[in-house]
Image (tube, rainbow, N blue to C red):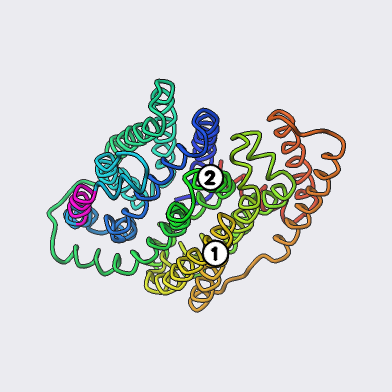
Amino acid sequence: MNIARSSFKLFGANIVSSATAFLGIAYFAQELGAAPMGVFFLFQAMLGLLAIPADFGLRGAVEKRISEGESQGEFLTSAVILKLVPITLIVAGILLLQSYVNNYIGENVAILLAAAIILQEAAQFAVVVLKGELRVGETAVLRLARQVSWVGVSTLFVTQGYGALGLIYGLLTALGVMFVLGLYKCSTSPSRPSIKHARSLFNYSRYNVVSSIGGYFYSWMDVAIIGLFLSQAHVGAYETAWRVTTIVVLLSDSIASALFPQVSRWNANNAKSRIESTIQETITPSMILVIPSFFGTLIFSSEILELIFGPEFAIASLVLIVLMGEKIVQSVHIIFGKALQGINRPDLAAYATVTSVLTNLVLNLIFVVQFGIIGAAMATTISFSMNAIIHGYYLSKFMDIRFPYSEISWCVLSSVGMALFLEGLRSLIVVNNVVSLVTAISAGALVYWLLIFTSKSLRVKLVTQAKSLVS
């Protein structure tokens, strides 16, 4: 598998799908306001948190075992049987406690939540099977189909006056589309399950579930706690800022998604040197878009939220800056995390995640009460930085990690130059509408890339990796 090509496919599709989702959220925010958006985001938060027991780390286990190339059908069928038990229990629990669920979210959506957890697990299962088959690039189509379906169907419902429920109906449709398309694309055929294969999956998943908990807590715990102590409007503003920051790690996510199954295969073949060199080569591309995004946000955070989403969302302008800084840490962590799991050490990833999750939970409970939504951003940034450091420490015990300090330093200097340019530009033009904002950001991006290409080492690396896409 060509990691660069697979990453590029994912990145291209993620750009389109994220742009679609971004435009959709901007439209829905303008039409509905912060509070209804908060209802939808709380629904997603519940869906994300319930996915922890529903999956119990099996997705990662399926991807890992199938990527090793042996008994793929047996692992597939054994995993399906294992997943039926927790999903059934969770659906029953939602239906029994539906009055509490409805009160927390703010709409009568418990039955829809039960349906969503089933559809989500089915859709994501199809994705990890494709990844395990080393067909990571093909999962891009599934991601794109999900976002296009969600925005399209949700728009129809919102225009008919369904409000937040319209967004939820759109999400259910999108998950269904993703599952059907994924099922069609998978080539692994079910085979007779066995206790042996189920035990192998469980042995991996019991540690991987902790890493999964870290991912879901990282994505949704802050939103869930904001929903407990603050208003739905605060939830809507905070999560909208979060969604803006996720755009800048699309390349990092794409690289990590392509990295894991290939590292898994190399580890099975004892190709340690290839893993080490690949980790080093992927760090700079993973960070190259995130660093300038942070410096650009320092200049235009208020304008991004107010002009694109509406005045109600400007209360999260400082949140946007803090979370954008956190994405710099995430761009490194995601490489270390996938590499550690790929070399079959989910136990160490689990230890790091437990520390981070507990820190995140405690800090969120303290900081949200004391500081509001900016407290949630601070808690997430501190805990995730800790997570990244511990992952890097554990990985260094098995791999020689050579961090490209000179290349990253040049990215920082180029970003500072871009920020100075933007500040000067801001004194010359008034950024008071979307067109002027996009123009300013585009000009800043051009300056950044011109500065990046003045570095010979970066220029050679980027050109070489671009050539590998078509080689």
Query: What amino acid type is highlighted by mark number 1?
Result: Phe
Question: Label 1 belongs to which residue?
Answer: 367
Give how far across and how far down residue 204 sits, in percent.
Answer: 30, 67
Residue 78: percent from left, percent from top:
18, 57
Q: Position of residue 59 (x, y in %)?
A: 31, 55
- Residue 199's quadrant in the figure? bottom left
Q: Say few, some or many: other residues with alpha carbon within 10 Å of mark 2 (under 14 / 14 to 19 / 20 or more).
A: some
Report if residue 274 is visible in the image: no
- Residue in front for this viewpoint, 181 or 377: 377
Q: What residue type is disc 2 on?
A: Arg
Q: Magenta stretch containing residue 382, yes or no?
A: no
Of 392 and 148, which appears nearest the observer?
148
**Disc number placed over residue 221 in the picture, else none:** none
Dot 1, crowdedness within 10 Å: few (<14), some or many (≥20)? Answer: some
Identity of the residue furthest to the top in this view: 160
Q: Is residue 424 visible?
A: yes
268 relative to 319 in the view: left or right? left
Mark closer to the observer (1, 2)? 1
User: Could you tell whether 409 is left or right of 49 in the image?
Assistant: right
Judging by the rendered image, the residue that carries numbered circle 2 is 243
Magenta segment boundaries in residue numbering: 86-97
Q: Which callout, 1 or 2, points at the residue further toward the start of the chain?
A: 2
Prevailing secondary structure class for the magenta stretch in the rendered image: helix
Badge 1 marks a residue whose secondary structure is helix
Using the numbered discs, state the Cα–Cα distance from disc 1 to disc 2 in whole angstroms: 21 Å
Label 2's element?
Answer: helix
